[in-house]
Amino acid sequence: MPLFASLQAATEAPKGPFAINPGVSIWTLVIFLLLVVILAKTAWPAILKAVEEREKKIQEQLDRAEKANQEAQRVLAEHQQKLAAARNEAQELLAAGRQAAEKVREEIAARARAEHEELMDRARREIVAEREKAIAELRGEAVELSLAAASKVLERNLDSEADRRLVREYLDSLHNTST
Amino acid sequence: MQTPDIGRMILERTGDAHEIEIPFGDLLKIRPLQLPTGWIVNVGGTPIDLSPTRNVVFLLVAAFLVWLTLWLTGRALTRQREQGGGAAAPRGFANMVEAVVLFVRNDVAIASIGHKNGAKFAPYILTLFWFILYCNLLGLVPYGEKPTGSFWVTGALALTALLTIEISGFVTLGAKGYLKTIVFTPPGTTGITAVLLTLIMTPIEIIGKLVKPFALMLRLFANMAAGHFVMLSLLSLIFLFGNIAYFRWAIAGGSVVFVLFMMAIELLVAFIQAYVFALLTSTFIGLMQHEH
């Protein structure tokens, strides 16, 4: 068709790109799908094969590196955990030792205090007993001495039981007033 | 000189026909090649005209050229690898084609669809890209025609995209997961609210599914047809002002310069639209793959 044939012969108005023509769609589908299949068979493998191989190799290496990294991370974490556990254990042992020592110290101190108290008590009791014994002895001696002195004064033997009682009563009264 | 009917001429030139012009046929007095007509097939009572048109012929030409380019590239790359002991870098034309193929495969298909399934869809996306690119470029060849300037062609390509998106979604998500992309209940709603929102959202989801390929179809068609319209309009200036003395030469010269400029832009658009179609198709496939 000459470029401007329509300029001379004006028939019915052309629809241009808006004409209805579903047949072209069917042709397009068939041609396109055939092209997809043919290219998949004849072109893409040759073009993409080397690329895909290269990509696969790189991916494998990356995967391996990633795996090694993960393993290293895991081992590191394990070691850190073990180290922390050991440190904890040491701390616990130290604390337990300190506690035991403290307990022993306190026990010893308590026992010493108790012994000391007991000694003091006994000493005090003995002193009191000795003093009372001494006073009683002194008192007996005083009776004898008084009686002897009195018999000398009276030139007579004041050896009767009644005399002794008299003096003892007197001394008792003395003792009672003195205490 | 009679006033030319520019609108009619443009519509005729951008439309389809059952004939192919022979280069310089006007000068050599060779009649255009007539294509067979009347291949009418009845599909469920609807007659469909399957007779080849100019667009069909150029679709075949584009498909053949795509195959030729990629087959030769594959052969050249294999030979270059063998020569280099499996480690040689590709060179020459094959290297350029390989770079484009790898760009579409890695930065369009795999980047949009995801590492897991991207490589599986790469051949489809690559074919789409190269086929659309060659169809677009054929429109810039003298006596050529761009089949992508017809929405019946772009519609069929968009239909393959729709089927790929939905079928791959069905395969990846399973029947239940796929149904969720149609019958959509907004999360966090219960009872009557959920029922109401589901009733509202489900038609919206279905429309969303159809709008995506529809937009693909329209974008490619409109871009390609618009280029034709602009170029023909600019060339028509020559005929509109053909009877102005002296100035008509300046107008003709200016018109040619403008058309040349438009052709440069069309060259750019041919690549951009092929890229956009491939990119959006892979993006939609990727969206469907990662739908939850």
Image: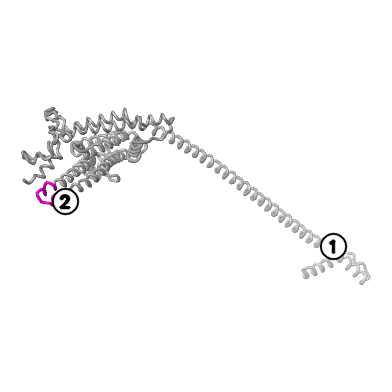
Which of A112 and A80 lies nearest the eye of the viewer? A80
Q: Residue at x 30, y 30 (%)?
A: A39
Q: Amino acid at mark 2?
A: Ala
Which of B292 and B111 lies nearest the eye of the viewer? B111
Q: Residues within 10 Å of mark 2 (few under 14, many from 20)?
A: few
Residue positioned most to the bottom? A153
Which of B209 and A62 lies nearest the eye of the viewer? A62
* Residue B137 visible to an observer of this rendering: yes
**Mark 2 lies on residue:** B250
Point out residue B180 in the picture as x, y percentages from the top left corner: 27, 38
Residue segment shown in magenta: B237-250
Assign the N terminus of chain A to one quadrant of the image: top left
Residue B174, disc: none
Q: Chain of mark 2?
A: B
**Mark 1 lies on residue:** A137
Point out residue A176 in the picture as x, y percentages from the top left corner: 77, 68
The reply to whether label 2 and label 1 mark residues of one chain is no
